[in-house]
Image (cartoon, coloured by chain):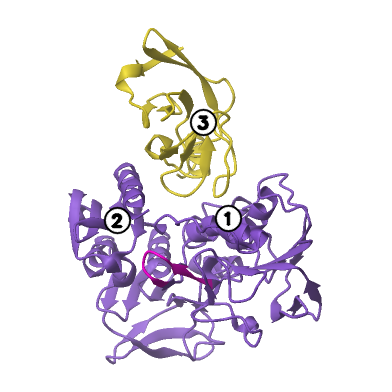
Chain colours: A purple, B yellow
Amino acid sequence: MRTVAVVGASLAGLSAARSLRKQGFDGRLVVIGDELHRPYDRPPLSKEFLSGTLGEAELALETEGEDLAAEWLLGARATGLDHTARTVRLADGREVRADGFVIATGAVARTLPGSAGLAGVHTLRTLDDARALRDELARGGRLVVIGGGFIGAEVASTAHTLGLDVTVVEAAPTPLAGPLGAAMGAVVSGLHADHGVRLLCGVGVKGLSGGHRVDAVLLDDGRSIPADIVVVGIGASPCVGWLEGSGIALDNGVKCGADGRTSLAGLVAVGDCANWYDPRAGHHRRVEHWTGARERPDAAVATLLAGGAVEPVVPRPPYFWSDQYGVRIQFAGHAAEADTITVEAGAADDRDVLAVYRRDGRPVAVLGMNQPRLFMRARKQLAATTA
Amino acid sequence: MIPACRLADLPRGEALRLDVDPPVSVFHTDDGEVFAIDDTCTHQDASLADGWLEGCEVECPLHASKFDLRTGAVDSPPAKLPVRTHEVVVDNDMIYVRLSTEAPNLPPCISARLAGGPA
Protein backbone atom coordinates (compact mmCIF):
# COMPACT_ATOMS: atom_id res chain seq x y z
CA MET A 1 0.00 0.00 0.00
CA ARG A 2 1.75 3.15 -1.20
CA THR A 3 -0.86 5.83 -0.67
CA VAL A 4 -3.56 6.07 1.99
CA ALA A 5 -6.17 8.82 1.97
CA VAL A 6 -7.97 9.66 5.20
CA VAL A 7 -11.24 11.38 4.37
CA GLY A 8 -12.13 13.48 7.41
CA ALA A 9 -9.80 15.62 9.53
CA SER A 10 -11.41 15.64 12.94
CA LEU A 11 -10.61 13.36 15.89
CA ALA A 12 -11.31 10.09 14.05
CA GLY A 13 -9.35 11.16 10.96
CA LEU A 14 -6.40 12.47 12.94
CA SER A 15 -6.38 9.34 15.12
CA ALA A 16 -6.37 7.20 11.97
CA ALA A 17 -3.44 9.18 10.52
CA ARG A 18 -1.53 8.73 13.77
CA SER A 19 -2.35 5.02 13.87
CA LEU A 20 -1.11 4.61 10.30
CA ARG A 21 2.29 6.08 11.18
CA LYS A 22 2.46 4.27 14.52
CA GLN A 23 1.72 0.96 12.80
CA GLY A 24 4.58 1.50 10.37
CA PHE A 25 2.89 2.87 7.27
CA ASP A 26 5.59 5.01 5.65
CA GLY A 27 3.96 5.73 2.30
CA ARG A 28 2.15 8.82 1.08
CA LEU A 29 -0.54 9.96 3.50
CA VAL A 30 -3.25 12.41 2.42
CA VAL A 31 -5.71 13.85 4.93
CA ILE A 32 -8.82 15.48 3.45
CA GLY A 33 -11.01 17.77 5.58
CA ASP A 34 -14.07 19.80 4.59
CA GLU A 35 -13.42 22.44 7.25
CA LEU A 36 -10.54 24.87 6.84
CA HIS A 37 -9.33 24.30 10.41
CA ARG A 38 -6.62 21.93 11.56
CA PRO A 39 -8.06 19.11 13.73
CA TYR A 40 -9.65 20.52 16.86
CA ASP A 41 -11.44 19.15 19.89
CA ARG A 42 -15.22 19.40 19.76
CA PRO A 43 -16.37 18.64 23.35
CA PRO A 44 -15.34 22.10 24.68
CA LEU A 45 -17.41 23.83 21.96
CA SER A 46 -20.58 23.52 24.05
CA LYS A 47 -18.79 24.17 27.34
CA GLU A 48 -15.50 26.00 28.04
CA PHE A 49 -15.13 27.44 24.56
CA LEU A 50 -18.73 28.66 24.49
CA SER A 51 -18.35 30.28 27.90
CA GLY A 52 -15.11 31.95 26.85
CA THR A 53 -12.83 30.23 29.38
CA LEU A 54 -10.98 28.32 26.64
CA GLY A 55 -9.53 29.90 23.52
CA GLU A 56 -9.20 28.52 20.02
CA ALA A 57 -5.51 27.71 20.36
CA GLU A 58 -6.30 25.36 23.22
CA LEU A 59 -8.73 23.36 21.06
CA ALA A 60 -5.94 22.08 18.79
CA LEU A 61 -5.68 18.30 18.79
CA GLU A 62 -2.19 18.18 17.35
CA THR A 63 0.70 18.68 19.70
CA GLU A 64 3.32 21.32 19.12
CA GLY A 65 5.87 20.17 16.58
CA GLU A 66 3.87 17.05 15.67
CA ASP A 67 4.57 16.03 12.08
CA LEU A 68 2.79 13.07 10.54
CA ALA A 69 4.41 13.72 7.15
CA ALA A 70 0.93 14.02 5.68
CA GLU A 71 -0.48 16.16 2.88
CA TRP A 72 -3.36 18.13 4.30
CA LEU A 73 -6.16 19.08 1.93
CA LEU A 74 -8.31 21.32 4.12
CA GLY A 75 -11.44 23.16 3.05
CA ALA A 76 -11.86 20.33 0.56
CA ARG A 77 -15.16 18.50 0.76
CA ALA A 78 -15.31 14.97 -0.64
CA THR A 79 -18.17 14.59 -3.11
CA GLY A 80 -17.71 11.12 -4.51
CA LEU A 81 -15.84 7.84 -4.43
CA ASP A 82 -14.87 5.76 -7.44
CA HIS A 83 -13.85 2.38 -6.08
CA THR A 84 -12.67 0.96 -9.39
CA ALA A 85 -10.39 3.92 -10.13
CA ARG A 86 -9.60 4.19 -6.41
CA THR A 87 -10.21 7.91 -6.32
CA VAL A 88 -12.03 10.37 -4.11
CA ARG A 89 -13.53 13.37 -5.89
CA LEU A 90 -13.42 16.75 -4.17
CA ALA A 91 -15.89 19.64 -4.47
CA ASP A 92 -13.33 21.77 -6.29
CA GLY A 93 -12.94 19.13 -9.01
CA ARG A 94 -9.68 17.63 -7.80
CA GLU A 95 -9.29 13.87 -7.47
CA VAL A 96 -7.17 12.01 -4.95
CA ARG A 97 -5.99 8.53 -5.92
CA ALA A 98 -5.02 6.11 -3.18
CA ASP A 99 -4.57 2.39 -2.52
CA GLY A 100 -6.35 2.51 0.81
CA PHE A 101 -9.00 4.78 2.30
CA VAL A 102 -10.10 5.59 5.82
CA ILE A 103 -13.57 7.13 5.82
CA ALA A 104 -13.99 9.48 8.76
CA THR A 105 -16.42 12.12 7.50
CA GLY A 106 -18.32 12.33 10.78
CA ALA A 107 -21.83 13.62 11.15
CA VAL A 108 -23.72 16.82 10.57
CA ALA A 109 -26.14 18.48 13.00
CA ARG A 110 -29.81 17.96 12.14
CA THR A 111 -31.70 21.14 11.45
CA LEU A 112 -35.31 22.10 12.00
CA PRO A 113 -37.29 22.22 8.75
CA GLY A 114 -38.20 25.78 7.89
CA SER A 115 -35.51 27.37 10.05
CA ALA A 116 -33.07 28.10 7.24
CA GLY A 117 -32.27 31.76 6.77
CA LEU A 118 -33.83 32.86 10.07
CA ALA A 119 -31.28 34.87 12.07
CA GLY A 120 -30.69 33.81 15.67
CA VAL A 121 -31.18 30.09 14.99
CA HIS A 122 -28.13 27.91 15.57
CA THR A 123 -26.91 24.36 15.52
CA LEU A 124 -23.66 23.41 17.24
CA ARG A 125 -21.25 21.03 15.66
CA THR A 126 -18.27 22.91 14.25
CA LEU A 127 -15.88 25.59 15.44
CA ASP A 128 -17.57 28.07 13.12
CA ASP A 129 -20.95 27.18 14.67
CA ALA A 130 -19.49 27.71 18.14
CA ARG A 131 -17.94 31.08 17.25
CA ALA A 132 -21.27 32.33 15.91
CA LEU A 133 -23.24 31.07 18.92
CA ARG A 134 -20.68 32.42 21.41
CA ASP A 135 -20.93 35.88 19.88
CA GLU A 136 -24.72 35.83 20.15
CA LEU A 137 -24.82 34.47 23.69
CA ALA A 138 -22.49 37.29 24.75
CA ARG A 139 -25.30 39.72 23.97
CA GLY A 140 -27.62 37.97 26.46
CA GLY A 141 -31.38 37.59 26.20
CA ARG A 142 -33.76 34.65 26.10
CA LEU A 143 -32.44 31.36 24.80
CA VAL A 144 -34.65 28.44 23.84
CA VAL A 145 -32.87 25.12 23.35
CA ILE A 146 -34.76 22.61 21.23
CA GLY A 147 -33.73 19.12 22.32
CA GLY A 148 -32.80 18.02 25.83
CA GLY A 149 -29.96 15.71 24.80
CA PHE A 150 -26.35 16.22 25.80
CA ILE A 151 -25.54 19.06 23.38
CA GLY A 152 -28.74 20.88 24.28
CA ALA A 153 -28.21 20.38 28.01
CA GLU A 154 -24.60 21.55 27.86
CA VAL A 155 -25.52 24.66 25.88
CA ALA A 156 -28.33 25.37 28.38
CA SER A 157 -25.91 24.98 31.26
CA THR A 158 -23.29 27.25 29.68
CA ALA A 159 -25.85 29.90 28.70
CA HIS A 160 -27.31 29.84 32.21
CA THR A 161 -23.83 30.47 33.62
CA LEU A 162 -23.49 33.40 31.21
CA GLY A 163 -26.68 34.89 32.66
CA LEU A 164 -29.19 34.15 29.92
CA ASP A 165 -32.80 33.24 30.54
CA VAL A 166 -32.95 29.62 29.34
CA THR A 167 -35.77 27.24 28.37
CA VAL A 168 -35.20 23.68 27.15
CA VAL A 169 -37.90 21.99 25.04
CA GLU A 170 -37.83 18.20 24.73
CA ALA A 171 -40.25 16.18 22.62
CA ALA A 172 -39.88 12.96 24.65
CA PRO A 173 -41.47 12.59 28.10
CA THR A 174 -37.96 12.31 29.63
CA PRO A 175 -34.73 13.75 28.22
CA LEU A 176 -31.76 11.40 27.78
CA ALA A 177 -33.96 8.30 28.13
CA GLY A 178 -32.17 6.74 25.15
CA PRO A 179 -28.59 6.92 26.38
CA LEU A 180 -29.30 6.73 30.16
CA GLY A 181 -32.70 5.06 30.53
CA ALA A 182 -35.79 6.95 31.74
CA ALA A 183 -35.01 6.81 35.48
CA MET A 184 -31.50 8.21 35.26
CA GLY A 185 -32.43 10.47 32.35
CA ALA A 186 -34.85 12.16 34.76
CA VAL A 187 -32.13 12.46 37.40
CA VAL A 188 -29.57 14.03 35.06
CA SER A 189 -32.08 16.35 33.38
CA GLY A 190 -33.24 17.38 36.86
CA LEU A 191 -30.12 19.54 36.85
CA HIS A 192 -31.99 22.10 34.75
CA ALA A 193 -34.68 22.71 37.36
CA ASP A 194 -32.05 22.65 40.14
CA HIS A 195 -30.55 25.73 38.52
CA GLY A 196 -33.71 27.56 37.54
CA VAL A 197 -33.68 26.58 33.89
CA ARG A 198 -37.15 25.72 32.55
CA LEU A 199 -37.52 22.25 31.05
CA LEU A 200 -40.63 21.49 29.00
CA CYS A 201 -41.02 17.79 28.20
CA GLY A 202 -43.35 15.74 26.07
CA VAL A 203 -44.11 18.55 23.70
CA GLY A 204 -42.98 18.88 20.12
CA VAL A 205 -41.98 22.00 18.24
CA LYS A 206 -44.38 23.10 15.50
CA GLY A 207 -42.14 25.80 14.13
CA LEU A 208 -40.37 29.08 14.68
CA SER A 209 -41.81 32.54 14.31
CA GLY A 210 -40.09 35.74 13.28
CA GLY A 211 -39.44 37.89 10.25
CA HIS A 212 -35.75 38.40 9.61
CA ARG A 213 -34.89 37.15 13.08
CA VAL A 214 -36.47 34.48 15.26
CA ASP A 215 -38.75 35.81 18.00
CA ALA A 216 -40.49 32.72 19.35
CA VAL A 217 -40.63 28.93 19.34
CA LEU A 218 -44.12 27.60 18.63
CA LEU A 219 -45.07 24.37 20.38
CA ASP A 220 -47.48 21.65 19.29
CA ASP A 221 -49.78 22.39 22.24
CA GLY A 222 -50.28 25.96 21.06
CA ARG A 223 -47.86 27.66 23.41
CA SER A 224 -45.41 30.21 22.09
CA ILE A 225 -42.08 30.61 23.90
CA PRO A 226 -40.44 34.00 23.28
CA ALA A 227 -36.84 33.66 22.12
CA ASP A 228 -33.98 35.93 21.11
CA ILE A 229 -31.72 32.98 20.32
CA VAL A 230 -32.64 29.38 19.45
CA VAL A 231 -30.29 26.41 19.53
CA VAL A 232 -31.45 23.29 17.73
CA GLY A 233 -29.89 20.21 19.35
CA ILE A 234 -31.82 17.33 17.84
CA GLY A 235 -29.00 14.98 16.97
CA ALA A 236 -26.73 14.42 14.03
CA SER A 237 -26.84 12.45 10.79
CA PRO A 238 -23.83 10.59 9.42
CA CYS A 239 -22.11 12.37 6.50
CA VAL A 240 -22.27 9.60 3.93
CA GLY A 241 -24.29 11.18 1.13
CA TRP A 242 -21.08 11.56 -0.89
CA LEU A 243 -20.70 7.75 -0.90
CA GLU A 244 -24.08 7.03 -2.46
CA GLY A 245 -23.68 5.27 -5.77
CA SER A 246 -20.12 4.16 -4.96
CA GLY A 247 -21.21 0.61 -4.22
CA ILE A 248 -20.27 0.75 -0.54
CA ALA A 249 -22.91 -0.68 1.80
CA LEU A 250 -24.67 2.12 3.69
CA ASP A 251 -27.10 1.58 6.56
CA ASN A 252 -27.30 4.31 9.19
CA GLY A 253 -23.80 5.36 8.12
CA VAL A 254 -21.13 3.18 6.55
CA LYS A 255 -21.89 -0.42 7.42
CA CYS A 256 -18.77 -1.96 9.00
CA GLY A 257 -17.58 -5.21 10.49
CA ALA A 258 -16.30 -5.46 14.06
CA ASP A 259 -12.86 -4.39 12.83
CA GLY A 260 -13.93 -1.36 10.81
CA ARG A 261 -13.89 -3.08 7.40
CA THR A 262 -16.52 -1.91 4.93
CA SER A 263 -18.16 -3.86 2.11
CA LEU A 264 -15.39 -2.67 -0.24
CA ALA A 265 -11.80 -3.92 -0.12
CA GLY A 266 -9.20 -1.36 0.92
CA LEU A 267 -11.72 0.87 2.67
CA VAL A 268 -12.34 1.13 6.39
CA ALA A 269 -14.58 3.58 8.24
CA VAL A 270 -14.31 5.12 11.72
CA GLY A 271 -15.97 7.70 13.94
CA ASP A 272 -19.50 9.07 13.84
CA CYS A 273 -20.12 8.07 10.21
CA ALA A 274 -19.31 4.39 10.84
CA ASN A 275 -21.88 1.80 11.90
CA TRP A 276 -19.73 -0.98 13.35
CA TYR A 277 -20.93 -4.48 14.07
CA ASP A 278 -20.99 -5.13 17.81
CA PRO A 279 -20.24 -8.82 18.35
CA ARG A 280 -21.49 -8.75 21.94
CA ALA A 281 -24.85 -7.31 21.00
CA GLY A 282 -25.13 -9.30 17.78
CA HIS A 283 -26.09 -6.26 15.71
CA HIS A 284 -24.65 -3.05 14.28
CA ARG A 285 -24.33 0.02 16.47
CA ARG A 286 -23.27 3.48 15.37
CA VAL A 287 -21.46 5.01 18.34
CA GLU A 288 -21.16 8.78 18.29
CA HIS A 289 -18.75 9.16 21.21
CA TRP A 290 -15.46 11.00 21.39
CA THR A 291 -13.75 7.93 22.84
CA GLY A 292 -14.92 5.74 19.95
CA ALA A 293 -13.48 8.22 17.44
CA ARG A 294 -10.26 8.20 19.43
CA GLU A 295 -9.87 4.46 20.04
CA ARG A 296 -11.38 2.62 17.07
CA PRO A 297 -9.09 3.96 14.33
CA ASP A 298 -6.28 1.81 15.78
CA ALA A 299 -8.23 -1.36 14.99
CA ALA A 300 -9.51 -0.10 11.64
CA VAL A 301 -6.02 0.88 10.49
CA ALA A 302 -4.68 -2.54 11.50
CA THR A 303 -7.44 -4.06 9.37
CA LEU A 304 -6.59 -1.80 6.43
CA LEU A 305 -2.86 -2.47 6.55
CA ALA A 306 -3.28 -6.22 7.00
CA GLY A 307 -5.85 -6.49 4.24
CA GLY A 308 -8.41 -7.76 6.73
CA ALA A 309 -6.31 -10.55 8.19
CA VAL A 310 -6.34 -9.44 11.82
CA GLU A 311 -8.38 -10.74 14.71
CA PRO A 312 -10.66 -7.91 15.85
CA VAL A 313 -10.09 -6.84 19.45
CA VAL A 314 -13.17 -6.60 21.61
CA PRO A 315 -13.67 -2.86 22.15
CA ARG A 316 -14.13 -1.53 25.66
CA PRO A 317 -17.70 -0.66 26.57
CA PRO A 318 -18.55 2.70 25.01
CA TYR A 319 -17.78 5.59 27.33
CA PHE A 320 -18.80 9.23 27.28
CA TRP A 321 -18.86 12.19 29.59
CA SER A 322 -20.72 15.45 29.93
CA ASP A 323 -20.26 18.50 32.14
CA GLN A 324 -23.40 20.36 33.13
CA TYR A 325 -23.94 22.96 35.84
CA GLY A 326 -20.60 22.05 37.42
CA VAL A 327 -21.57 18.37 37.66
CA ARG A 328 -19.36 15.77 36.00
CA ILE A 329 -21.49 13.12 34.31
CA GLN A 330 -19.86 9.89 33.13
CA PHE A 331 -21.44 6.87 31.50
CA ALA A 332 -20.14 3.57 30.15
CA GLY A 333 -21.94 0.61 28.60
CA HIS A 334 -25.43 0.21 27.20
CA ALA A 335 -28.40 1.40 29.26
CA ALA A 336 -30.99 -0.28 27.05
CA GLU A 337 -29.79 -3.76 28.04
CA ALA A 338 -30.52 -3.25 31.75
CA ASP A 339 -33.38 -4.79 33.72
CA THR A 340 -32.41 -3.16 37.03
CA ILE A 341 -30.59 0.00 38.10
CA THR A 342 -29.07 0.23 41.57
CA VAL A 343 -27.72 3.34 43.27
CA GLU A 344 -24.48 2.08 44.82
CA ALA A 345 -23.10 5.31 46.25
CA GLY A 346 -24.37 8.81 46.92
CA ALA A 347 -27.93 9.83 46.19
CA ALA A 348 -29.71 10.62 42.95
CA ASP A 349 -31.43 13.67 44.47
CA ASP A 350 -28.06 15.14 45.41
CA ARG A 351 -26.81 14.70 41.80
CA ASP A 352 -23.88 12.93 43.37
CA VAL A 353 -24.36 9.30 42.54
CA LEU A 354 -22.95 6.06 41.22
CA ALA A 355 -25.60 3.87 39.56
CA VAL A 356 -24.94 0.40 38.17
CA TYR A 357 -27.19 -1.01 35.43
CA ARG A 358 -27.54 -4.80 35.40
CA ARG A 359 -29.16 -7.48 33.31
CA ASP A 360 -29.69 -10.86 34.98
CA GLY A 361 -27.43 -9.65 37.77
CA ARG A 362 -24.55 -8.87 35.42
CA PRO A 363 -23.38 -5.23 35.04
CA VAL A 364 -24.09 -3.79 31.58
CA ALA A 365 -23.61 -0.08 32.23
CA VAL A 366 -22.61 2.43 34.87
CA LEU A 367 -23.47 6.09 35.46
CA GLY A 368 -21.53 8.50 37.67
CA MET A 369 -22.35 12.04 38.68
CA ASN A 370 -19.43 13.71 40.44
CA GLN A 371 -17.98 10.28 41.29
CA PRO A 372 -14.87 9.93 39.09
CA ARG A 373 -13.04 7.57 41.43
CA LEU A 374 -15.89 5.10 41.97
CA PHE A 375 -16.93 5.45 38.36
CA MET A 376 -13.49 4.38 37.12
CA ARG A 377 -13.56 1.31 39.35
CA ALA A 378 -17.02 0.39 38.10
CA ARG A 379 -15.98 1.02 34.50
CA LYS A 380 -12.97 -1.28 34.85
CA GLN A 381 -15.21 -3.94 36.36
CA LEU A 382 -17.66 -3.52 33.51
CA ALA A 383 -14.89 -3.93 30.93
CA ALA A 384 -13.68 -7.08 32.72
CA THR A 385 -17.13 -8.68 32.82
CA THR A 386 -18.06 -7.81 29.25
CA ALA A 387 -14.73 -8.72 27.63
CA MET B 1 12.34 13.87 50.29
CA ILE B 2 8.87 13.44 51.63
CA PRO B 3 7.55 10.19 53.10
CA ALA B 4 4.51 8.84 51.22
CA CYS B 5 3.43 5.65 52.97
CA ARG B 6 4.62 2.17 53.80
CA LEU B 7 5.04 -0.05 50.76
CA ALA B 8 2.90 -2.66 52.49
CA ASP B 9 0.04 -0.15 52.73
CA LEU B 10 -0.06 0.43 48.96
CA PRO B 11 -1.16 -2.80 47.25
CA ARG B 12 -0.25 -3.49 43.64
CA GLY B 13 -2.61 -1.83 41.19
CA GLU B 14 -3.35 0.98 43.66
CA ALA B 15 -2.45 4.65 43.82
CA LEU B 16 -2.06 7.15 46.62
CA ARG B 17 -2.58 10.87 46.23
CA LEU B 18 -0.17 13.03 48.25
CA ASP B 19 -1.62 16.31 49.43
CA VAL B 20 1.27 18.52 48.38
CA ASP B 21 0.89 21.54 46.10
CA PRO B 22 0.39 20.67 43.29
CA PRO B 23 -0.67 17.15 44.36
CA VAL B 24 1.44 14.12 43.48
CA SER B 25 0.29 10.54 43.08
CA VAL B 26 2.26 7.41 43.84
CA PHE B 27 1.46 4.27 41.85
CA HIS B 28 2.27 0.66 42.68
CA THR B 29 2.05 -1.24 39.40
CA ASP B 30 0.89 -4.81 38.97
CA ASP B 31 4.54 -5.68 38.27
CA GLY B 32 5.60 -4.33 41.64
CA GLU B 33 7.25 -1.09 40.54
CA VAL B 34 6.57 2.21 42.28
CA PHE B 35 6.33 5.54 40.42
CA ALA B 36 5.38 9.10 41.32
CA ILE B 37 3.95 11.67 38.90
CA ASP B 38 1.94 14.88 39.18
CA ASP B 39 -1.60 13.92 40.14
CA THR B 40 -3.46 16.48 38.03
CA CYS B 41 -4.11 15.71 34.35
CA THR B 42 -2.59 18.41 32.15
CA HIS B 43 -5.87 18.74 30.22
CA GLN B 44 -8.47 19.30 32.93
CA ASP B 45 -8.78 19.16 36.69
CA ALA B 46 -8.83 15.39 37.27
CA SER B 47 -6.91 13.24 39.74
CA LEU B 48 -4.77 10.64 37.98
CA ALA B 49 -4.73 8.61 41.20
CA ASP B 50 -8.37 7.86 40.27
CA GLY B 51 -7.33 6.76 36.79
CA TRP B 52 -7.13 3.40 34.99
CA LEU B 53 -3.74 1.86 35.79
CA GLU B 54 -2.50 -0.69 33.30
CA GLY B 55 1.14 -1.72 33.08
CA CYS B 56 3.23 1.43 33.32
CA GLU B 57 0.46 3.71 32.09
CA VAL B 58 -2.40 5.50 33.78
CA GLU B 59 -5.44 6.70 31.86
CA CYS B 60 -7.08 9.89 33.06
CA PRO B 61 -10.40 9.08 34.80
CA LEU B 62 -12.27 11.69 32.75
CA HIS B 63 -11.13 11.41 29.17
CA ALA B 64 -8.80 9.13 27.28
CA SER B 65 -5.27 10.48 27.65
CA LYS B 66 -2.75 7.99 29.02
CA PHE B 67 0.40 9.05 30.86
CA ASP B 68 3.57 6.96 31.00
CA LEU B 69 4.53 6.59 34.65
CA ARG B 70 8.22 6.26 33.74
CA THR B 71 8.53 9.39 31.61
CA GLY B 72 5.37 11.41 32.23
CA ALA B 73 4.72 11.47 28.47
CA VAL B 74 1.13 11.59 27.21
CA ASP B 75 0.03 9.30 24.37
CA SER B 76 -2.95 11.10 22.82
CA PRO B 77 -5.44 13.95 23.16
CA PRO B 78 -7.18 15.64 24.78
CA ALA B 79 -4.08 16.20 26.97
CA LYS B 80 -1.09 17.48 25.05
CA LEU B 81 1.56 18.14 27.70
CA PRO B 82 3.40 15.62 29.88
CA VAL B 83 3.14 15.42 33.65
CA ARG B 84 6.28 15.71 35.77
CA THR B 85 7.79 12.56 37.16
CA HIS B 86 9.24 12.46 40.67
CA GLU B 87 12.01 10.27 42.01
CA VAL B 88 10.87 7.42 44.24
CA VAL B 89 13.02 5.79 46.89
CA VAL B 90 11.87 2.74 48.82
CA ASP B 91 13.86 2.37 52.01
CA ASN B 92 13.12 -0.03 54.79
CA ASP B 93 9.56 -0.66 53.47
CA MET B 94 8.89 3.08 53.37
CA ILE B 95 8.13 4.95 50.12
CA TYR B 96 9.75 8.39 49.79
CA VAL B 97 9.27 10.89 46.97
CA ARG B 98 11.81 13.51 45.92
CA LEU B 99 9.78 16.24 44.22
CA SER B 100 10.85 17.49 40.83
CA THR B 101 12.06 21.07 40.65
CA GLU B 102 10.71 21.57 37.12
CA ALA B 103 7.66 23.74 36.50
CA PRO B 104 4.47 21.63 36.42
CA ASN B 105 2.13 21.54 33.39
CA LEU B 106 -1.16 22.32 35.08
CA PRO B 107 -4.45 22.46 33.13
CA PRO B 108 -5.69 25.91 32.05
CA CYS B 109 -8.46 26.03 34.68
CA ILE B 110 -6.00 25.51 37.55
CA SER B 111 -3.34 27.79 36.09
CA ALA B 112 -5.98 30.51 35.85
CA ARG B 113 -7.02 29.93 39.47
CA LEU B 114 -3.41 30.12 40.66
CA ALA B 115 -2.97 33.34 38.68
CA GLY B 116 -6.02 34.79 40.46
CA GLY B 117 -8.25 34.71 37.40
CA PRO B 118 -11.65 33.06 37.06
CA ALA B 119 -11.56 29.30 37.47
* Dot 2 crowding, Cα within 10 Å, few <14, some 14–19, many 20+: many
Identify the secondary structure beneath mark 2: strand
> CA separation, marks 1 and 3?
22 Å
Q: Are marks 2 and 3 on the same chain?
A: no
Q: Position of residue A258 (x, y in %)?
A: 49, 65
Classify A285 as above or below A357.
below
Residue type at tag 1: Asp
Please name the residue that numbered disc 2 is placed on.
Answer: A367
Q: Are marks 2 and 1 in contact (CB under 8 Å)?
A: no
Residue at point 37% right, 32% down? B13
According to the picture, the residue beneath numbered tag 1 turns out to be: A298
* Residue under disc 1 on the same chain as residue under disc 3: no
The percent coordinates of residue B71 (x first, y second) are: 58, 30
Instruction: Residue at 70%, 51% (x, y): give it.
Output: A21
A151 left or right, relative to B72: left
- Specify the subunit that label 2 lies on: A
Q: What chain letter is assigned to the residue under label 3?
A: B
**Residue bounds of the magenta highlight:** A274-283
Closer to the eye: label 1 or 3: 1
Q: Nearer the viewer, residue A175 or B65?
A: B65
Residue with the most extreme top position = B92
Q: Earlier in the sequence, mark 2 or mark 1?
A: 1
- C-alpha separation, residue under disc 2 versus residue under disc 1: 26 Å
Q: Nearer the viewer, residue A266 or A93?
A: A266
Using the rendered view, name the quadrant where residue B104 is placed.
top right
Residue B62 place in picture, x, y as percent: 42, 48
